[in-house]
């Protein structure tokens, strides 16, 4: 996140509901570095991701992180541009 071209981290946990719980990393450190660098953390509300979880998103906000809420398109044959997902 300290690279000058990085301004957002998508899927911070890489969680895939119900198949993969996500990365086992030090999220408090991730949040601290996001605050330090001004990096936005994505909250993906798509049913297959729910990445970050509600509890983790609240921790990120409490730490001072900026978060962006998005949802991956779930309709068949739907491109991101056509459906307006961020």
Image (cartoon, grey):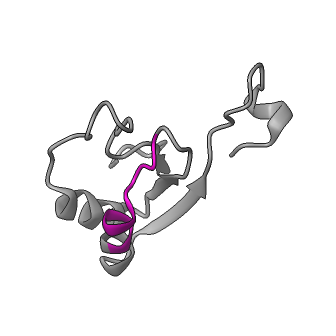
Q: Position of residue 30 (x, y in %)?
A: 25, 57
Q: Position of residue 14 (x, y in %)?
A: 35, 37
Residue ranking furthest to the right: 82
Q: Which residue corresponds to the image point at 42% horizontal and 42% vertical from the top-left?
A: 11
Residue ranking furthest to the top: 77
Q: Which residue corresponds to the image point at 37% horizontal and 58% vertical from the top-left?
A: 53
Q: Which residue corresponds to the image point at 49% horizontal and 64% vertical from the top-left?
A: 67
Residue ranking furthest to the front: 18
Q: Position of residue 13 (x, y in %)?
A: 31, 45
**Residue 57: in magenta span:** yes
Task: Tell which of 82 and 65 is nearer to you.
Answer: 82
Q: Which residue corresponds to the image point at 22% horizontal and 40% vertical from the top-left?
A: 23
Task: Tell which of 78 and 60 is nearer to you.
Answer: 78
Task: Tell which of 52 and 66 is nearer to you.
Answer: 52
Q: Would residue 31 appear left or right of 54 to someone viewing this image?
A: left
Q: Would residue 3 appear left or right of 8 to someone viewing this image?
A: left
57 is higher (above) or lower (below) than 6: below
Dividing the picture into quarters, in which one does residue 52 lie?
Answer: bottom left
Q: In the image, which residues are magenta? A: 49-58
**Residue 78: in magenta span:** no
74 is higher (above) or lower (below) than 12: above
């Amino acid at each position: 996140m300290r690279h000058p071209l990085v301004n957002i981290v998508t899927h911070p946990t890489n969680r895939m509901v119900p198949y993969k719980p996500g990365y086992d990393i030090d999220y408090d450190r991730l949040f601290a570095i996001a605050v330090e660098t001004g990096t936005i953390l994505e909250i993906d509300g798509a049913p297959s991701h729910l990445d970050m979880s509600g509890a983790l998103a609240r921790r990120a906000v409490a730490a001072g992180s900026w978060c962006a809420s998005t949802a991956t398109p779930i309709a068949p044959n739907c491109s991101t541009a056509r459906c307006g997902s961020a």
